[in-house]
Structures are given as C-alpha cells and as structure tokens.
Amino acid sequence: MEVVEEFKVGTFPRGIGLTKDGKYLVTANKDDAAISMVNVKTKAIEKTIEVGINPEFVRIKDGLAFISTEPSSKGKPPAPGEQKHEEEEDEDDDDDRTPAKVSIVDLALGEKVRDITAGPETEGIEFSKDGKQIIVTNEADNTITVHDFMSGELIKTISVEPYGLRPRGIKVSPNGERYVATLEHSDNFIVLDKDFNHIKTVKTGKSPYGTSFNAAGDKLFVAAGKSKTLEVYATEDYSKIKDIQIDGKRCWHFTFTPDNQDILLACGRSDEVVVVDVGDLAVEKRIPVAGIPWGIVSYPPAIGSLDQVR
C-alpha cells in the first residue's frame, strides 16, 4: 500500500480503466478530448485517440472502451494557485442541454468506431449482467438511459426526477437483479429492478457519487463526497450498516482490492488514497498521492465504482 511508480498518461486525466488481460491502461484526458492507451509493462503511451469534448468516464468490456463525453459541461479545475470554496468544487454549469455522446473505441483497432447519443452531461456507464445493454446516467436532464450494447440504440429512458436530481453513479448487483444509481443533488440513491422499475429510494450523506456492491452482493457501498464518508448498506433491505468517516476531500471513486480485504478510495481534494479495512469497516491507512486523484481500479479486476469482476 505504497506508491511505487508514476508515469504520464495525458492532460488532466479523469476516467480510468484496465483491459481484461491487464495489458493496457486507458485514461480519459479532459484537456486533450482524447483517451490514452498506455502499455502497462512499458509505461509508454502507444496511442492517443480523439473521442470528443470533455471525456470523463471510462468502462471497458469485450475489447471496447466506452467513454462518456460532456460537451455542455463548463466545469474546470482551478488555475495554479487558485482555490475554490469546497461547496463550489467540481460543480458544472448545466444550462446547456447539448446532447452528450458515449464514444466507443475498438482497442484492437485503436480507433473510435461509433457513438451513442445520450442525454446532456452523460456521466456514469454500466453494463447489464448479460452484457446486452449499456446503462448511462445523464446529469443535466435527470435521466437514466438504456441502450443496446451492439447498436447503441435507445431502448428505454427512466426519469429520476420523481426521486431526486443529478444521477451520477450507476452499478449493477453481482447477480444482475438490481441497479443502484446515486442522485448527487438530492443526497440519496435509488434502487431499480432488472427491468429498471423503481423499487426504493434511500437517503444518504451529502453528494453521493461512486457506488458499488461488494463481490458477495450482500452490501452496498456509497461514497458521499461532501459528508466525507463511505456509507455501507445491507442489500436485503438497504438499511444502513455504518458510516465510515473518511475525512478526505472529494472522495468520489473507490475499488476493492482483488482479494476483497481492503477498499481504496481516491480523494482528489486532499491528494490521497484512503485504505479501508473491509473486515472492521475502518480506515487503516492514508497514502499521499499528489495531483488531484480522480479514479482508481485494480488488477486482477475487482469490483468497484469504476469496474466489475470480469
């Protein structure tokens, strides 16, 4: 649990993903409007592929990288030396309703092969258990859209406005029977069944974002950024088990370790990765990581807010 190496990937990287074989790291580089394919062994960028304005989220499945882009978002990092108030950090201007795209890149070809048109300010991406559908959260119009995996055709649109505002994180349960989406501006999450019917709304701490079940599927974890907590729920009834006080700033994304013994949270505004012991649900270590860490994944693939056991 120490930093052992550092290497360049692109300008202002955010979303991050690993190929199933662990050969390539893929990052979404905001200021480049592109992704980088980095050879993990050599640490060299083998290819830079343009994907669209403001790329943010990366998910990889079946040799394809899916990258959410946000052409209407005007959120930007502070200039060197500039400080934002905590309540202003990472806020976006949602006035523009330009439709966003999910760009699809064939990693073997090293090129973008098609786009999926989603809602304005597309954010999270998830796949159904059977791999036939892509599920996307759209912040600015408060929808979750379901698309065909192969064609990208829109299958269903779910409005979350009856339950809250600004959907961000989206996660399928290990058995494929439930989906959970965090609603950042309403301080809650919703539970949907496998057909995307609403089952339950559950209150959380302030500004929930990254979410993931554990590998067994009996617990749900939610990173509540502005409450500085990692919240744990029992999936039998979504009752709260514990609020783990993280005390890091802007802890958005996390991953389990491959052995499921620890959780690692990337805490961007406190420049650290926080390690939580899964057994006693308590912070066991803080690892300094300069540069506003945004996301984190592990290899061999483990479940987390940005990845799934494959």
Image (cartoon, helix red, strand yellow):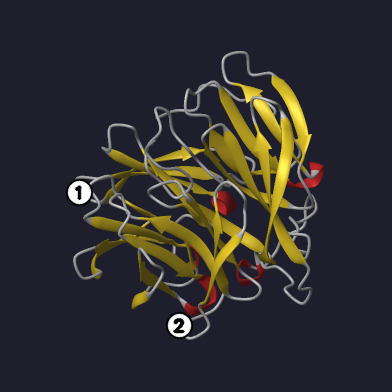
Q: Is residue 165 left or right of residue 94?
A: left
Q: Is residue 9 left or right of residue 275?
A: right
| Badge 2 or badge 1: first in the primary sequence | 2
- Badge 1 amino acid: Asp
Q: Which residue is mark 1?
A: 280
Q: Is residue 98 left or right of residue 270?
A: right
Q: Which residue is mark 2?
A: 163
| Residue positioned 49% across, 79% down in the render | 186
- Name the secondary structure under disc 1: loop
* Above or below: residue 25 compared with residue 59: above
* Above or below: residue 79 compared with residue 91: above
| Residue positioned 79% across, 46% down in the render | 31
State the residue in front, 206 or 209.
209
Crowdedness of circle 2 by 10 Å Cα count: few (<14), some, many (20+)?
Answer: some
Q: Is residue 135 left or right of residue 275?
A: right
Q: Disc 2 vs disc 1: which is toward the camera?
A: 2
* Above or below: residue 40 compared with residue 71: above
Q: Position of residue 101 (x, y in %)?
A: 71, 56
- Badge 2 amino acid: Tyr
| Residue positioned 78% across, 68% down in the render | 98
Instruction: Let me know if residue 227 appears in the view.
Output: no
